[in-house]
Amino acid sequence: MSAIHENTTSALQKNLIALGTIVRREVMRILRIWGQTLVPPAITMTLYFVIFGNLIGRQIGGVGPFTYMEFIVPGLIMMSVITNSYGNVVSSFYGSKFQRNIEELMVSPVSPHTILIGFVTGGVLRGLAVGLIVTVLSLFFTTLQVHHIGVTALVVLMTAAIFSMGGFINAVFAKSFDDISIIPTFVLTPLTYLGGVFYSITLLPEFWQKVSMANPILHMVNAFRYGILGVSDINIGVAIGLMSLAAILLYLFCIRLMISGRGMRQ
């Protein structure tokens, strides 16, 4: 029993060291190329604030009791979290796969769970960092009052984790560097723009409201908007439930890919 306990403790320590190494490498990568990872989204979102919030917002007026700027800020923060958490993992993991670093990790005594959690944590940290930068920038254009801090924190963490795992899956199946840009360009971007970032779905005809409900990003944006502004177009309990289910299913699928080794060799 003592030998088994020592082996278990040793394996746990090795996995914790490996996890710390992967996360530290991801953080150093983000900071080393900060001009590519942190600055561009800040500039892009500032342009959104100026063009949509100030210029177009003046013509539109308000959305319910809020100014147009107040209404779109939560959606823009969530948009930056989604794109950056996804982009970090898909580029980092595919780069590691291309350089054959993943093969070395796969044959090491490190658990597949440790490898996956390490890369996902890196994506979550970048998503949160960019989200924080965008939040600070938004304060130059409007005031933010967080109504439900627990909901806000839970939604942003779950969203970052979900899209980090989505980026992981994209990287696993990618055969070239071109493949890692297909999903963000042709899937993520349209879903984000149609996810209620710039408008309330209550403005749509009933049929299109029902169609919009199939968009997962709509639930995330509205849940986050509820945390910030206290209003939402959808049921918050349903949104968080769907996000929890998506996170669990994606994690199980990612682990299955890791254990099978499918797509891990370039």
Image: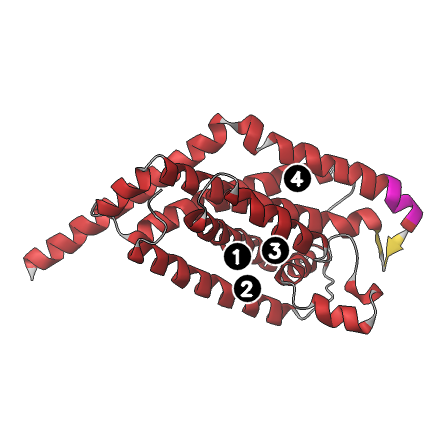
Tell me which numbered mark, 4 or 3, is placed earlier along the sequence: 4
Whether tag 1 and tag 4 are in contact, CB under 8 A, the answer is: no
Rounded to the nearest whole Å, what is the CA distance between mark 1 and mark 4?
18 Å
Is any atom of residue 160 visible in this view?
Answer: yes
Quadrant containing the C terminus in the rendered view = top left
Residue position for label 2:
243
Whether tag 1 and tag 3 are in contact, CB under 8 A, the answer is: no
Q: Nearer the viewer, mark 1 or mark 3?
A: 1
Where on the picture, by quarter, is residue 255?
bottom left
Is any atom of residue 145 visible in this view?
Answer: no
Q: Position of residue 226 (x, y in %)?
A: 69, 60
Rounded to the nearest whole Å, what is the CA distance between mark 1 and mark 3?
10 Å
Who's the residue at 65% across and 56% down the image?
A: 224
Boundaries of the magenta span? 55-59
Tell me which numbered mark, 1 or 3, is placed earlier along the sequence: 3
Q: Nearer the viewer, mark 2 or mark 4?
A: 2
Whether tag 2 and tag 1 are in contact, CB under 8 A, the answer is: yes
**Residue 42 drawn above or below residue 226:** above
